[in-house]
Image (tube, rainbow, N blue to C red):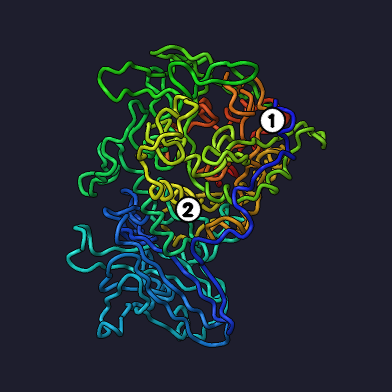
Amino acid sequence: MIPPGTGVTAAYSPLYEPGTEVVEQLQYTEPDGTLVTFMGARPTERHARERGEAWDAPDTGPGRYFTFPTFYFQNRTFGLEIRDEVPAGRQKISVYLHVNDGTFRGTTFSLFRNINNPNVRDFGWSLNYGFNNPLEGNQPICHAGTRDCMMSFTSNWRTSPHSKLKIGDKIELAPAPRLLSPALDGGGERYYSFEQLYVVGKGMRPWYGIAPNLDSEPLPDETLLGGQASVSYNYSEEPHRVFQQMANNIGIKNTKSFVQGRRLFHTSFADGTHSEHPNSNPVFTEHKGQLGPRYNQARCIECHTANGRSAAPAVGARLATLSVLTGAAGAGDTVLPDPTYGWNVQQVPGSASGPSYGVSVASFQKTVRTLADGEQVELVKPVYSFSGPVPSLYSVRQAPQVIGMGLLEAVAEPTILALADPDDANGDGVRGVPHWVNNPETGKVHLGRFGWKATKASVRHQVGDALVKDMGVTSPVFPSVSCQKGSPDCRSTTAATSVSETELQRMSDYLSLIGVPAQRSLRSGYPEGIRVSPEHDVNPPLIQRGSAVFAEARCTSCHTAQLTTSNTHPFAELRDQTIRPYTDLLLHDMGPELADTLTEGQAAPSMWRTQPLWGLGSLKFVQGGAQNVRYLHDGRARTLTEAIMWHGGEAAGSRDRFAALPKADRDALFAFLESL
């Protein structure tokens, strides 16, 4: 139970105070009406509509549009400044190239997809141009820190003949950067980039493909799970990479922060290599040998599969990508660190002489539940084996997907607290309480948002905690490995940390700016006779019915469908967004069957934060197949049906309503969840 005095009205400090300045401005309107928009861009390998084969050929593999080429994290990010004079009553749009680092030479720019040509399918544009610099003899040489390279147009090239530009016109933007030859760092020189949709008089918009030939169209607001930060529909058949993409509305400088933070997320703190192209990407020598004396994995990405969840636990295999939190009972209701493990088990010793502390699943306890129509559901609960001492209190946790974290951080505290009902005033059996946590750096009381029990207040706090507990890597949040052991003076060290303040900020920025895939609830306009990609083979009426069933079962009592972010977050990309995460970020008592033995802060063993549902339907792609997807905190549930049937406590009513549904309604519900 939540201790007295720590309920909804507890005194707290907002994570971001009113008046917080933005890191980077994304859009503004000049006094004469000119709309100025900034669009960040990163390198990629191919085009947005290119699959791994010709459009009319059998499937042979994914495309390479969502990929991150070698050396992506340095000297290759850039952006566009779009000066739109149409709202000011004039017929002109000018585009300036901004290079973040170094010099580009020969950058091309394609605009206005050529939908009038029936042969244009995977790519093809009406206007192909470049950026020339009058200060370089009109050569296409563009330097970082300047805005001398530009181009402009005065008509709509999507029509034939061209028409006047008007508010609402669609313009595809496909810049393709080229570095000086030879490249200044030994990496590649010629790249493609993201194909973005600009709507005249409005700005950047996430898009999907309509007839003819997957023409670009702004996605309707109701599909934008992450607001304008949502990731557009993907037509290069790379759904396994969909959790790794930038927010659609990302700024120019923030794109650089994103790729720098991503590099750290993929870096081994053992040998400094990158998880992708380790023999081609340069070694990050600063991080060689920075793993602690014990750890679980050497890279962040090794637990969060493709930015998704842990690998599925199997009997007898070490739980190398899950966390095992530990504790020991103290006086009263306090929890102390375990005398052997501290706050969690670090399973891998840093030296050959270190003791083995492996944790594995010894077996599964099985029970069978029967739905109203007679369908039987087998539920399995893991039984764990410890090669070291068995902790008196412990909780096994799978790593969650990391999409949309910045958007959740940007929701204002009063918005979340308004959803709490600790005394069940409305009598629906659902309470929901906030989890108040202390900032480890300042001691201030904040509202918890992250982690399975909402024990972390900020993305920064979450990153620092994972670094020290799962890898033994220190940071300004937890500057000593003794923090993992629960030492009361662990912050008193003056030694340099493994991860610097700059690097910690980059990792936090990266996680904050990962976009959320838009809901796949619309049919796309594939050409006649072309195979529809599996992730887009959806049934909109069935999804719509499933959404209604979800609400009728009162699942939205906890999985709140819609929230609005504040205007105080440092990232303008995350401000004032209407998002659909399907969470209230509150703690709920889920009953004894989902309880473990460990209390965290004010969260008793049976209390869990409502898990966001966005991205749920992409998990089977991200994890390498539906057989590898696991649900709930310890990954016990193999299917959505199992996950729902494990719900108890405050969720028992919704569980029972689900169990009573006819199969057609259950199928509709799953179609809806798979669309998220």
The residue lying furthest to the bottom in this view is 90
User: Earlier along the polypeptide chain: callout 1 or callout 2?
Assistant: 2
Q: Secondary structure at mark 2?
A: loop
Disc 1 crowd, CA 10 A, few/some/many (<14, 14-19, 20+):
many
Instruction: Name which residue type carries label 2.
Output: Leu
Drawn side of residue 224 relative to residue 238, left or right:
right
Number of the label disc, if any, that sits on residue 198: none
Number of the label disc, if any, that sits on residue 651: 1
Drawn side of residue 522 relative to residue 138, left or right:
right
Q: Quadrant of the N terminus?
A: top right
Residue 382 location (% of width, % of height): 50, 18
Residue 646 location (% of width, % of height): 61, 25
CA separation in Å, label 1 and label 2: 32 Å
Instruction: Name which residue type carries label 1.
Output: Ala
Residue 590 location (% of width, % of height): 66, 27
Report the residue at 22% width, 59% height from top: 188
The residue lying furthest to the top in this view is 389
- Quick check: 71 above or below 478? below
Residue at mark 2: 513
Question: Contact (CB < 8 A) between labels 1 and 2?
Answer: no
Q: Foreground residue, 646 or 190? A: 190
- Quick check: 177 above or below 423? below
Q: Nearer the viewer, mark 1 or mark 2?
A: 2
Report the residue at 49% width, 46% height from top: 403
- Quick check: 629 above or below 182? above
* Count of all numbered marks drawn on residues in the image: 2
Q: Foreground residue, 489 or 118? A: 489
Q: Secondary structure at mark 1?
A: helix
Disc 2 crowd, CA 10 A, few/some/many (<14, 14-19, 20+):
many
